[in-house]
Amino acid sequence: MSLNLNKSKGFLLSRFKEGEGAFGATPLLPPTLEDTFFAIVALKYLQPEFLAEKRLKLLNFLNKALEKSQEKIEHLFQILKICKILEISPPEPFMTKTKEFLTHFIPLSELPPFSLYALWNLGMFFSNKELSLKIQEKVPRYQIKTLEDLYYLGGIDQEIWHKHYEVIIKSQNGDGGFRFYPGTTSFLENTYYALKILHEISSEERPIARGLDFIRACFNGDGGFGRKPGGISYLTTTAMAIEILYLYKGL
């Protein structure tokens, strides 16, 4: 199926809840911070003027999300990323909560790679050099189980990507997509992680071209992208697909 990004815009915008000023997983479900994050990531490429128009509503939603927040590292990181995309200063409750959180974070050994990456980014934003150095020292001792682990740990220390280059290449299946483990199915999110890494460290065209073909094959008639060809469209996978296609100019 050929890509129709006008349909992708429609898919994304149909998830926007005007009253709450945020996005939900479907037109009927209530908005969440995670869904809003991924919708914004995708619309940054497809319709940035919509984000500019809704900037105030989105900021109000972020403030409400902060009121309800359990101070999860991932949520604070997503709020920071949203503010950067919208080109606004993080709201004051975010600044206060995060500064306090960074002085009482849980032991690094208990954090999965994505949480560690999120914490590292927050530490860098607040110029917490002590925390950043502790995380960088911890990274090489992490056990890498999936391409997702590799993506986030290498986001802190790119040397890890170079050391595991062959692991990435051997994770590609015959359909061009990338898998969790040898012998398992290709999924768009794994392909996203692999292609993001390869964009930084490799000039080999064949694995990248085949990966882009797999991502295109995940496009659905509703304008969204599924985890695999013929799979249900999600905001998460749609955002990942659009980001990669724009990154490689593969549209």
Image (cartoon, rainbow, N blue to C red):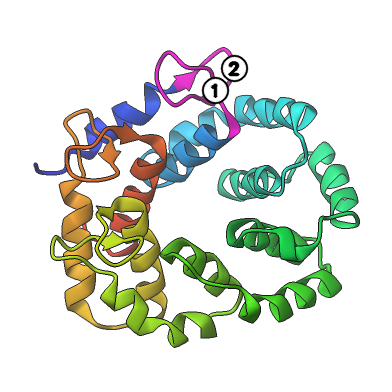
Farthest left residue in view: 1
Q: Nearer the viewer, mark 2 or mark 1?
A: 1
Is residue 25 in the magenta section? yes
**In the foreground, 66 or 193:** 193
Q: CA distance from mark 2 to mark 1?
A: 7 Å
Local secondary structure at mark 2? loop
Q: Are the residues tagged 2 and 1 within 8 Å (C-beta)? A: yes
Residue 96 makes an appearance in the image? yes
Residue 248 horizontal/vertical position (percent): 29, 65
Q: Amino acid at mark 2?
A: Glu
Residue 157 horizontal/vertical position (percent): 59, 79
| Quarter of the image where the C terminus is located | bottom left
Residue named by callout 2? 20
Residue 251 makes an appearance in the image? no
Is 242 placed above or below 209 here?
Answer: above
Q: Which residues are magenta?
A: 16-33
Is residue 169 in the magenta section? no
Is 11 placed above or below 139 here?
Answer: above
Q: Residue at x 44, y 86 (%)?
A: 162
